[in-house]
Every structure is written in C-alpha cells, then in structure tokens.
Amino acid sequence: MITINTISELLTLSVSQFRIYDIGRIITKISKSDFSKIELNQLPYPFPSQDHACIAIVFWQKKSLEPYLWFVKIPLDERGLLNQAALSHFIAIIVEALGLEINTQHNKTNLTLTPTAQQEELLKSNPYHFTPAQYKLAALNSIVKVELKQLPSQHYQYCLDYIKGNLGWKNWHNVAIQGIADVAARLDQDNNACLLTQHLTNLPEQVLLPLCGTLENQNLPLELIDALIKCFEQNAQNSLLQQHLLRALAASSTHIHVKTLISQLLSPTNNKENRVNDDLLIVISGRCWLALQEGDLLMRFLEKLVQAQDNTLFAAIFKDLIAIPTIRPMLFTCMRQPNRSDALARAIGQLFNQLRA
C-alpha cells in the first residue's frame, strides 16, 4: 500500500500533467517545487486570502490535453502554513470519492477518468471544494489555454471585432466574459495590447469593468499601463471605475509607473476631502500589495488607512497584510517606527488590545 501525504504526490503518481495556481487574490502560477515545499510546511503559503490557501489544480493527460480542474480551499495556521490535518483530510476524500487504487507495480493511477454522478457529488460536497467567481473561472480558463497552446474560446473573435470598433461601441450585449478574458490573456497576439490601449476610453463600463477584472492577472506592457493610469486620473469622480482600473494594474504593481500612481494616492495630507476612499485602500492591499513591499509606501498606506477612522476596516486590512509573508516583516518594522503618527500608534494599540482580550 502506498501512502499519499500531499496533493503533489497524488498528482505525480497519476498519469496526468499538472499545474498549480493561486486564485485567492490574483491568478498566480505556483511552481511545482514551491508547491511541494508549501505542502511539507517548508514554506508559508505566499498568497493567503482570509486565512486560507485558495488553489486551482489543473491537470490533464498528455494524449488529450483536456484539462480537469479542482478548486481547493485549505485553512492556514497563524504562521501561514497549510493545516496538515485539513490537507490529509482532503486527499483522503479524493481517494475515497474516486475509489482510487494505486497500481503498486507501476506506481500510477488515473485521476482523469470521468467520475460517476455519485462520485462527482462527493467531490463537490467535500468541505474543501469551492467555486470561484465567474470572472475568475473565465480568466483561468483563458490562461490555461494560452499555456497549453490551445485555441481561444468561440467568443474570442467576436470580442476582438468589438474592441477593434467594427461592431459599434453601443453593441456590447453579445460580448461574452470569456471572450474578454481571452483577449486579456493574449495581449501579445493579434495586436491586442495596442488595440486595448487605443480604444480603452471608447469601451463602455459594461465591457471595461470585466476587462479590468481579467487584466489584473497579466503583466501589462508599458503603453497599456500608461493608458489605464491616464483613464484612472481622468475619472476622479467615478469611484467604481477607479477601483476597477486600479485592479487592472495589480499584476503590474511593481512597475515604477504604477508605484508612482499609488505613491501619489498615498501622499501625506491633512485635508479630509483628499482622503483616498476606503474601496481604493482595499484594492491596494488586496490586489496591489506587491507595491507595498517597499517600507516607505507601506508606512504611507498605514497612515492613510488610519485617516478613515474606522477601527474595523483598519483591523481587517492589517490582519490581511500581516498574513502575507513578504509584507509581514516590513509591517512589524512600520509598527516600531518612532516617527509614526499618534493616530497610527493608537490604532495599532487598540488592535493588539482586542487580540489579547
């Protein structure tokens, strides 16, 4: 009998190829070597979301290239490590639900056999299964197709024709989310990045908002970054649109132009009218956290956050940021900064008093 302790072992023993993605924040590929270390608690989970690892497992057989998807939500401990009991429980559910028998002679099993209706129900009803939002499913599907060198969906060409302006900007009703995701995942094909840069301001919000939700997973070219920033600056009175435009820059938030934008948003001010609204602060911490990996920007972010005078918001964002391994040490440094404001010192003190209570 072969004992299976990790998802990586289960997938390696199968006849499938596989890839791992985090989808709790933006869609980010996790290397097999890093994921193996994460499962063995040799590395903290890099992209925690509400104290959980939200993982998409994509696997397929070489001969078919038809991917299967598992969406797994595993709790993390206070150190950001995977809960080993939950991980073992999930694996046991998979083995039992699919009735897997490991071939001890060849050390292989097949996970891509179509499950029966009863097995499918068992898989979907397990406590670690979750269903991502529709826009994330579409984005992941597009990303996987690109990585496996497969054709885009049937909605791609229609969306492309729309973005070219061939169909009229008012005729957005038949532009599918999947088509938008396909365009975003193929910025280096069919002149897509240039088309989006050229026509960004022509797109109605019904298309632009979901487009931003798919662009957040892509490292964008300079021209498109600058077009999104310009659009952000021109829509100061449209809070919802600004939130989405800032989200679109998430995977590119280490770019100097994006960090400059965030730095401007977080510039010190005592004018309440110029205070960054709470939703933009949530986008910065939840999507553009990579920009906060510089101590100066992180400190400015915390000072801007306390201006909201909302203890619940401060506690929620602080707990979210401190769970991110790359942010945690800098956050502790910020907490000890002698030049921090009295308001920030009080907010941190109140937070820790609540944790001790």
Image: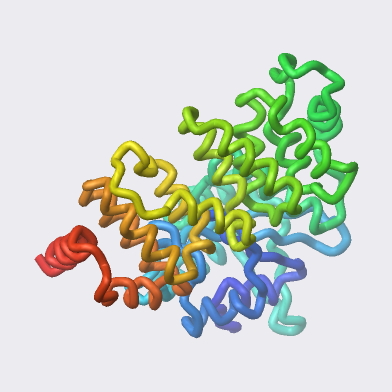
- Within the image, what quadrant is residue 99 found in? bottom right
Could you tell me residue 119's position as x and y percent?
A: 57, 51
Residue most toward the left? 357
Quadrant of the frame with the N terminus? bottom right
Residue drawn at x 51%, y 51% as measured from the top left: 122
The number of numbered discs placed on residues in the rendered structure image is 0
The percent coordinates of residue 177 (x first, y second) are: 68, 33
Decide which of 224, 174 is in the foreground and name it.
224
User: Which residue is nearer to you in this view: 257 or 70?
Assistant: 257
Give the residue displayed 86% in from the left and 21% down from the top.
166
- Name the foreground residue: 95 vs 253: 253
- Residue at the location (49% across, 56% down)? 263
Is 162 on the left or on the right of 93, as rendered?
right
Side (left or right) of 18 relative to 126 = right
Q: On the image, which quarter does residue 171 sit in?
A: top right
Task: Where is residue 33? Give x, y as percent.
Answer: 65, 80
Q: How is the image coloured?
A: rainbow
Residue 305 in view of the camera: yes
| Residue 88 seen | no
The reply, left or right, for residue 209 in relation to residue 328 is right
Compared with 40, 214 (above or below) is above
Q: Quadrant of the C terminus?
A: bottom left
x and y percent of residue 126 in the render? Answer: 46, 54
Residue 180's place in the image compared with 117, above or below, is above
Q: Tell me: residue 315, above or below residue 225.
A: below
- Residue drawn at x 57%, y 54% is 26
